[in-house]
Amino acid sequence: MQGTAIAQPNIALIKYWGKRDVALNLPAVGSISITLRELHTRMHVIFEDGLDADTLTVNDAPDENMLPRLSACLDRVADQDRPRARIASQCNFPIAAGLASSASSFAALTVAAAHAAGKSLTTAELASLAGQASGSAARSILGGFVELTNTNGGIAVDSLCEADEWPFAVVVAITETGPKAVGSTAAMEISRKTSPFYSNWVDQQAADLDTARAAIHDRDFARLARVAEHNCLKMHSIMWASRPPMVYWNAATMRCLETVRSLQARDIGVFFTIDAGPQVKAVCLPEHAADVEAALRKTQGVEDIMVSGLGQGARLEAAT
Ligand code: 2P0
């Protein structure tokens, strides 16, 4: 009655922002992401008869705050009358700081819990269960370039290109390590209800997805760069125009954007993307990673840098 799974976070190039069904956690729009290799969450789940309640440790420290969301995910994967569980999570990067820790956490939890419950689930079932816990987690079920598509009443995930078929490097410039002020779940709802730009965002997403999918198919880096930056800035514009406004950026975030622009002016193939946090992810071809990392390291306000290639989807770590 136990399972251990490992999953990597993913970075959306065409973003998910907003829900069409809050109760079922269904996204309003499709999205396209890249799954990372070097950042990971490892989840260990043991169902134990006789336990009174689920318990959770995150990096060996008890964590009550995240537990209800994880327990609800276990209820969906293993049924409500399941035995209570001990859950242990190990994460090698900052949590809740705009680095998609919920994506890797819930993808790993879903895979570990399905195994612990003796269930053999399809990729589609795993993605649907992970996505109900956290929309972006559905994409971390697969590796490389992943598209999440809305279906009638649900979602589907597809691999557009495996990690080794078009190797990328992602240089993450960390400008602040604390948790964000507004979680993305709440922020999406504020955006949907108050931003004057929200409906345009939803209407235009199909065109951005088409462009990105074609660029990935053609291995056209410049085209992918243009649409990814546009989609990212459009998502942040929705938040800036919400009431109350939500600005996840800090001064160093802006300086990192300027650094990426100066690299582009030197004909270095790189583009930026930013999620619900102040970190900047600079996406480039592997041969440019050293130049991009050096430039971002010199950027004022950058506290740390992580460099990652593209990785695989969520998987069981060992037969347990
Ligand atoms: C994304 N983000 O596509 C977008 C871009 C952040 C900005 O998905 O409410 O933790 O749990 O479904 O998946 C982060 O939101 O939100 C996210 P819920 P999630 O990666």
Image: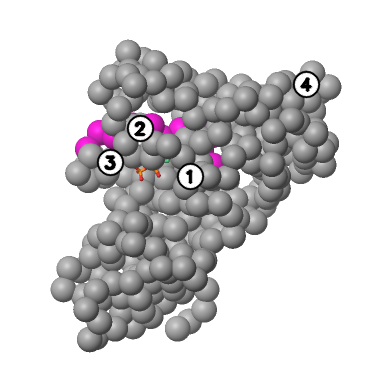
Q: Are marks 1 and 3 in contact (CB under 8 Å)?
A: no
Q: Are marks 2 and 4 in contact (CB under 8 Å)?
A: no
In the image, farthest residue toward the top: 196
Quadrant of the rendered image containing residue 249: top right
What span is colored magenta in the figure?
Answer: 11-21
- Mark 1 or mark 2: whose residue is earlier in sequence: 1
| Label 1, residues with CA under 10 Å away: few <14, some 14-19, many ≥20 | few
Query: Nearer the observer, disc 4 or disc 1?
Result: 1
Residue at image location 56% in from the left, 34% down from the top: 278
Distance of label 4 from label 1 (alpha carbons): 29 Å
Distance of label 1 from label 3 (alpha carbons): 24 Å
Residue at image location 33% in from the left, 66% down from the top: 121
Q: Amino acid at mark 2?
A: Ala
Q: Give the residue pinned by disc 3.
A: 26
**The image quadrant in which ligand 1 is located:** top left
Judging depth in this view, the residue of 219 and 274 nearest the camera is 274
Query: Nearer the observer, disc 3 or disc 4?
Result: 4
| Label 3, residues with CA under 10 Å away: few <14, some 14-19, many ≥20 | many
Q: Is residue 12 magenta?
A: yes
Q: Give the residue pinned by disc 1.
A: 179
Q: Are marks 1 and 2 in contact (CB under 8 Å)?
A: no
Distance of label 2 from label 4 (alpha carbons): 31 Å
At numbered mark 4, what does the secondary structure look like: helix, strand or loop? helix
- Marking on residue 187: 2
Residue 169 left/right relative to 142: right
At numbered mark 2, what does the secondary structure look like: helix, strand or loop? helix
- Residue 123's place in the image compared with 183, above or below, is below
Distance of label 3 from label 4 (alpha carbons): 38 Å
Q: Give the residue pinned by disc 4.
A: 262
In the image, farthest residue toward the bottom: 50
- Mark 3 or mark 2: whose residue is earlier in sequence: 3
Residue 105 left/right relative to 312: left
